[in-house]
Amino acid sequence: MTFKLLTTLTIFACLAGVSALWAQEGAAPGADLSAPREAQPMPEMSDIEADWARGDFVSVRAGLRRLAQERGDAFSAYRYGRVLLEGRGGPVDVAQADHWLSRAAEGGNVDAATLLARVYLSNIPGGPPREPARAAGLLSQAAARGNAEAQYLLGLLTDGGTGVPQDAAMAYNWFLAAAEQQHPGAQLEVSRALSRGKGTALDTGAALDWLTRAAENGEAEAQFYLSNAYESGGSVPANPTEAMRWLRRSAEAGFLPAQGRLGAKHLAGGDVAQDPAEARRWLGRAAQAGSARALYLLGLAYLGEDGGAADPAQALQALRNASGQGHGPATLRLAQLAETGLANAMAADFETSVALYRKALAEDQPEAAPHLGSLAARGRLDGLVAPHQAVPWVLAAAGTGDVNAEAWLAARAGEGLRPALVAQGRWLLDRAQPAGAAESFRTAAQMGDTDAQYELGRMYSQGTGLVQDYLMAHAWLNVSAAGGNDTAAELRGVIGDLIPPEEEAAAQARVRAFFAAVAQADPGTPVAMPGAPEDAAPGGVEPAE
């Protein structure tokens, strides 16, 4: 089921909360507290309409109650059920709304059937349990009688297989029926189906036509997509003026992505004028609706990046809120601010900045890695981060040309730090220094690093940086696979198909001898693979043949 359906169907969920405001001691559950205490003349519907126009919903509710109870017609029952559901003139009473809407639907009122279907799809607190199949049955009756809203909702249920079997073609037919009655949401769904060829033939021209109709009829999401079309110039000629016109209409209609994008455009300038007031207005709206990206951009705006006056306190609040939602760019910006400080709003705090850089890295902000690596290479992380944790960051910094990072990596590899040896091997391999890479991988492999064992086995199989040797390749790949490296196991199988059975047996014997030597060696002592004298590590253990 689409997001739009979920949004549409759950709008009643917030209504039940207001009922407590109307609680009255001694009132029975479901009692209508607006009921008249003395007999009154039977109202006419025209009188109720006049009360509605004046905003006198207490009188509206009382009048509809009498009409529904005493006349019993379907229209009065529908109107009464609706005011009970919406909490007009009294408390929300979902149970009584269910009762009266059911009576109205049984009496043939299609609007009641459609509204009741929403109730059965919403799981409203205090109301009936969610029953998609029952909702689909109600919508089917109303849709068959031409109710556009019911046709649209039934299309959504059929498209998603909710309460009814999934059927894209049937869903398209329901959408089309509602769209031809000018239902904007259905027109958008018809456009979506035609653009994807889902339930109907692919037809991008017709898709654009229906998208335009939906946008012109006020469908905010359609307006946003039409703006995209005019901006990209794909299905229609590019037209920046039209793109901005539809984007503004969508934003004004409350469509969150449009509000965020419009604010971002005014923040950056370019195809529209940079406008601090407009940037903050639209980003603020999107941020209030829960957009983490809008919060981040609003933080940048309050830092003065929109050309307006800076407000450091507001900037920090917005960035922290965005970071709290896991927004990586906001976390990265906070890390930079924590490192340098921000006016009178934030004092520099190096430890906090390091924690934030690490959080940003975990939130898919790779640019945090070389900065952390540069800090580690200069000794700034000593005592805060263990060297083996800093290795990938330093490798990233070395990749940017940081000579301090290169020196740090070489020094840690020289000290026998396994992650540094592996990283140095890959660094040298990327820079066409295979012999040096092989030595780094060999040392780490002899110390038990499964990644290095795989790399060394691969290099032996290809003859990269050392003499090609399938037996040694098979042996090191076997050891790596035993350590859980699935890629090594796959390559070992390929090598096994290339060598005679007796050579494969010899390679396996080397592995057994290697593991026996590992069991006898002190922890951390390099153990060479038997069969190749150059594999022995200085001061390491040479297994007996």
Image (cartoon, grey):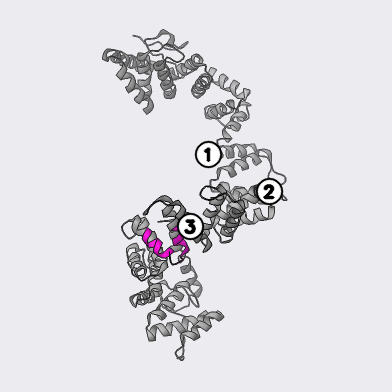
Q: Is residue 386 above or below residue 495?
A: below
Residue at the location (32% across, 63% down)?
133
Q: Which residue is mark 3?
A: 209
> Residue 200: x and y, percent?
37, 54
Can the viewer see residue 68 in this picture? yes
Q: Secondary structure at mark 2?
A: loop
Is residue 256 on the magenta stretch? no
Give, as a three-letter code, the residue at label 3: Asp
Q: Nearer the viewer, residue 11 or 513?
A: 11
Q: Is residue 152 left or right of residue 415?
A: left
Q: What is the magenta range?
A: 172-189
Q: Is residue 137 above or below residue 204?
A: below
Decide which of tag 2 and tag 3 comes sooner along the chain.
3
Can the viewer see residue 290 in this picture? no
Q: Is residue 90 left or right of residue 96?
A: right
Q: Which residue is mark 1?
A: 364
The disc label shown at residue 306, or none:
2
Which of labels 2 and 3 is toward the front?
3
Decide which of tag 1 and tag 3 comes sooner along the chain.
3
The disc label shown at residue 492, or none:
none
Q: Are marks 2 and 3 in contact (CB under 8 Å)?
A: no
Q: Mark 1 Cα within 10 Å, few/some/many (few <14, many 20+)?
A: few
Q: Secondary structure at mark 1?
A: loop
Q: Is residue 128 above or below residue 382?
A: below
Give, as a three-letter code, the residue at label 2: Asp
Q: Quadrant of the N terminus?
A: bottom left
